[in-house]
Image (cartoon, helix red, strand yellow):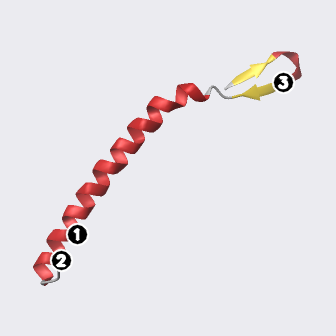
Amino acid sequence: MKTNGSQGYKSVTYSNLVAPLIEAVKTLKAENEQLKDRLAAIAKKLGDK
């Protein structure tokens, strides 16, 4: 975040957020896949399809 001059306006440099957001999405996708696998294994043990 930047403060612009004496008027005190604040701004966000959104281009600096792109890489961290992409990494966050990758992390969440991997976690989602793990949870899907766990759910499938539990369903298999219970005899569900």
Counting from the top left corner in percent of width and height, residue 16 is at 54, 25
Q: Quadrant of residue 11?
A: top right
**Which residue in the rendered view is the most extreme toward the front?**
49
Q: Quadrant of residue 2?
A: top right
Q: Which residue is mark 1?
A: 39
The residue lying at 17 percent from left, 74 percent from top is: 42
Query: Which amino acid, by three-letter code, is at mark 3?
Result: Gly
Q: In the picture provided, is 5 more to the left or to the right than 19?
A: right
Quadrant occupied by the C terminus = bottom left
**Which residue in the rendered view is the most extreme toward the bottom?**
47
Proximity of marks 1 and 2: CB atoms separated by less than 8 Å: yes
Q: Residues within 10 Å of mark 1 (few under 14, many from 20)?
A: few
Query: Which amino acid, by three-letter code, is at mark 2?
Result: Ala
Q: Residues within 10 Å of mark 3 (few under 14, many from 20)?
A: few
Counting from the top left corner in percent of width and height, residue 43 is at 18, 77
- Which dot, 1 or 3, sits closer to the camera? 1
- Which dot, 3 or 2, sits closer to the camera? 2
The residue lying at 50 percent from left, 31 percent from top is: 18
- The CA distance from mark 1 to mark 2 is 6 Å
Counting from the top left corner in percent of width and height, residue 31 is at 30, 52
On screen, residue 41 above or below 20 = below
On screen, residue 9 above or below 28 = above
**Which residue in the rendered view is the most extreme toward the right?**
7
Considering only order in the chain, which callout, 3 or 1, is on the residue closer to the N terminus? 3
Q: Which residue is mark 3?
A: 8
Q: Which residue is mark 2?
A: 43
SS for tag 3? loop
Quadrant occupied by the N terminus = top right
The residue lying at 35 percent from left, 42 percent from top is: 26
